[in-house]
Image (tube, coloured by chain):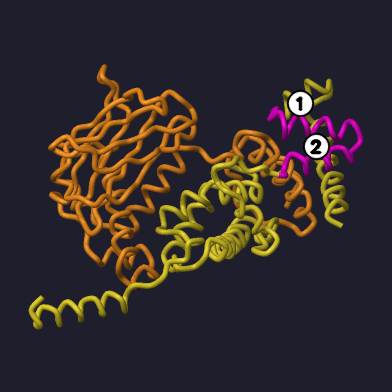
Chain colours: A orange, B yellow
Amino acid sequence: MSDRRLFSFIDALIAGRRPGRLKADPDDVEVLRAAITLGSARPGDATPDEQFVADLYQSLANQADPTPANVHPLRMRRGRTALAAAAASIALVGGTFAATESFDQSPATTAAVGVPHEDALRTGTFETPTGEVLGQIVAYNGHPSWVYMNVGVSQSTGTVMCMLQLNNGSIVAAGTIEIHRGTGELSKSIPVDIHRLRGAQLFTSTGAVLGSATFA
Amino acid sequence: MPSARRAVHSRSVAGDAARLRVVDPDGYPDWEAVYRDNIDRLYRLMYARVGNRPDAEDLTSEVFRTALGPLRLASSKGEVRAYLLTTAQTVLASHWRRTLGLPVTSIDPESDIAALAEPSKIEAPSDAPQRAGKILAALPDRYRRILELRFLEACTIKEAAQAMNISVSNAKVLQHRALRSAAKAELELEQ
């Protein structure tokens, strides 16, 4: 590799760009390695971008459940569709986990169990009393039934309690959402038919109501 | 229970029992748990090996796409992480083969297992700053300064030249010599 090309490669590393393809000389390997070591010491890029983590998660969820047509008729917003796909994947894997030997198989294999019908999913949006959106919740009817929710709150760390409410007002399940960088998620199996659910409420660790969701 | 129903029930129970198995409490319940527990540290490891975000993201994605398909979730967390690392080793080797034709950096599943072994919710204590600090400390002042400006402070070559009161051409030469010297220092650190 010429000095000029070597400089270009290193310049790209320093600028955080993807370096181009080059034919490296064995003599350059140690220099490139030193440049990578020095570059990776800079704070910032060494931490994965949250959007990247979320996008890859969604992509893997789609890979595990490659039939988005099953959730399309719900006409959900993009965020909720993503949540439903994730919930469906969890439900498929969770159901497999519960009672079949295909637990040992890949997510692609578990998809053969079947994807949820649209009436097997219920969704809701967590909102504060003033109407600010806090997150989404999806309930999946199966064996077992599952709920999956994500929330975004002003506090950067800590916990948020979630309680599910039946149509008759009783509480059927509760869970704690760990908040990390202002967001958190919870998936939990629930021992009820999801069509008996009215909604869910979020509480702070001191018991104050953060918000609530009513299932559509 | 009527005998016929009892028989069916018994067969059902027996069938379920045959399919049920003990789940290792040290294992992952599903692919999502594998992902959430390892995405952070696997990305950091990949970033430390390629030094730029776009490639680190692509390679991390490739590892998960490749590994999650044939992954046996019945394995322990340690076994799953070792499998992810083995996949990462292959993915990184292919990356260097495609881009430079030579393996500039590598992943060793045995020595790098510590990179994935810690709980993911704790910020990974990367050793990159310490390692870079040792390399820079071994260099003459001017070599150290040009590399600090360029790599740690992300200055352009023009900005670095201005900060050191030298021409851009001299800054390029200085950077090149400094990197050669840093490479030697890194090799000595490894020995």
Residue A35 position by quadrant = top right
The chain that hosts pointer 1 is B
**Mark drawn on residue A56:** none
Q: Secondary structure at mark 1?
A: helix
Q: Are marks 1 and 2 on the same chain?
A: yes
Labels 1 and 2: the sequence-earlier one? 1
| Residue annotated with mark 1 | B160
Residue B94 shows in the view: no
Determine the residue positioned at 72% across, 35% down: B151
Q: Which residues are magenta?
A: B127-156
Determine the residue positioned at 73% across, 49% down: A32
From the viewer's perspective, tell me whether residue B189 is left or right of residue A43.
right
Residue A73 in the image: above or below residue B17: above
Chief SS of the magenta region: helix
Mark 1 touches mark 2? (CB < 8 Å)? yes
**Residue B15 at x, y percent in the picture:** 25, 79
Which of B4/A27 is in front? B4
**Residue B30 at x, y percent in the picture:** 40, 58
